[in-house]
Image (cartoon, grey):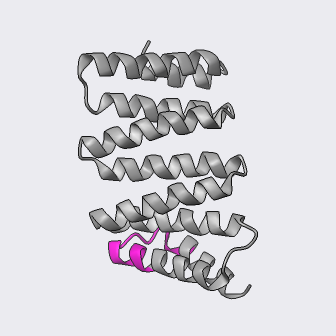
């Protein structure tokens, strides 16, 4: 079975078979020595686990994918996977754990200098901070502001409104 079969199976409402297909795709890619296909299959496996509320398994697969993306020199994909795992944890109301992962995404984005990844990581950080009951209003505002600045530096006007709304919202609390 392939990753594409897993996607189709999930779309057909057969999540157990989809998880099996994604796991098989990762295994086949590993055995074949396909450096990019293994973590890509693990991303799909992470999502399938997350959508079936198997968060711990999602995080385990996601950590594997993140490590592989870093190893093969695609840190932007690692950032994306960290954000995906953060979302899975947030949905499960495990915001303290999500905060740890999203801070890793922010740091990796800073380390690579990718302003787009930084903007999305900061936006996710702000969302997690918002979900925490005891967030610091000034830190939240500063995070939204930095995300907005990063978006402006990339010329990505599509998401600028979202960051502007977050900045305005955080300054009114």
Residue 149 position, x and y percent, is 42, 80
State the image quarter where residue 68 is shown: top left
Quarter holding the N terminus is top left
Up-down: is 104 above or below 48? below
Query: Would you say residue 114 is visible in this rendering?
Result: no
Query: Would you say residue 62 is visible in this rendering?
Result: yes
Q: Main secondary structure of the magenta part?
A: helix
Residue 85 position, x and y percent, is 54, 46
State the image quarter where residue 170 is shown: bottom right
State the image quarter where residue 71 is shown: top left
Q: Residue furthest top?
A: 1
Residue 70 position, x and y percent, is 30, 46
Count of numbered marks: 0
* Left/right of residue 75 with respect to residue 22 in the rendered view: left
Residue located 32% across and 42% down the image: 69
Up-down: is 159 above or below 53? below
Residue located 58% across and 60% down the image: 99
* Left/right of residue 36 with respect to residue 95 in the rendered view: left
Up-down: is 62 above or below 151? above
Quarter holding the C terminus is bottom right
Up-down: is 136 above or below 115? below
Which portion, as a residue range, is magenta?
149-161
Q: Inspect the magenta stretch and tell me whether residue 72 lies in it.
A: no
Residue 89 position, x and y percent, is 63, 48
Residue located 39% across and 64% down the image: 107
Q: Inspect the magenta stretch and tell me whether residue 160 lies in it.
A: yes
Residue located 39% across and 43% down the image: 66
* Left/right of residue 138 with respect to residue 62 in the rendered view: right
């Amino acid at each position: 079975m392939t990753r594409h079969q897993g996607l189709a199976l999930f779309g057909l409402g057969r999540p157990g078979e989809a998880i099996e297909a994604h796991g098989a795709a990762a295994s086949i890619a590993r055995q074949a020595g396909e450096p990019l296909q293994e973590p890509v299959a693990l991303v799909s496996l992470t999502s399938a686990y997350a959508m079936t509320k198997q968060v711990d398994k999602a995080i385990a697969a996601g950590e594997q994918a993140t490590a592989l993306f870093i190893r093969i020199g695609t840190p932007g994909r690692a950032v994306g996977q960290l954000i995906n795992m953060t979302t899975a944890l947030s949905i499960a109301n495990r915001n303290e754990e999500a905060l740890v992962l999203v801070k890793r995404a922010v740091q990796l984005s800073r380390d690579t200098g990718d302003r787009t990844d930084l903007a999305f990581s900061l936006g996710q950080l702000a969302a997690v901070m918002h979900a925490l009951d005891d967030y610091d209003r000034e830190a939240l505002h500063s995070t939204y502001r930095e995300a907005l600045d990063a978006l402006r530096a990339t010329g990505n006007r599509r998401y600028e409104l979202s960051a502007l709304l977050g900045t305005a919202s955080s300054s009114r609390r």
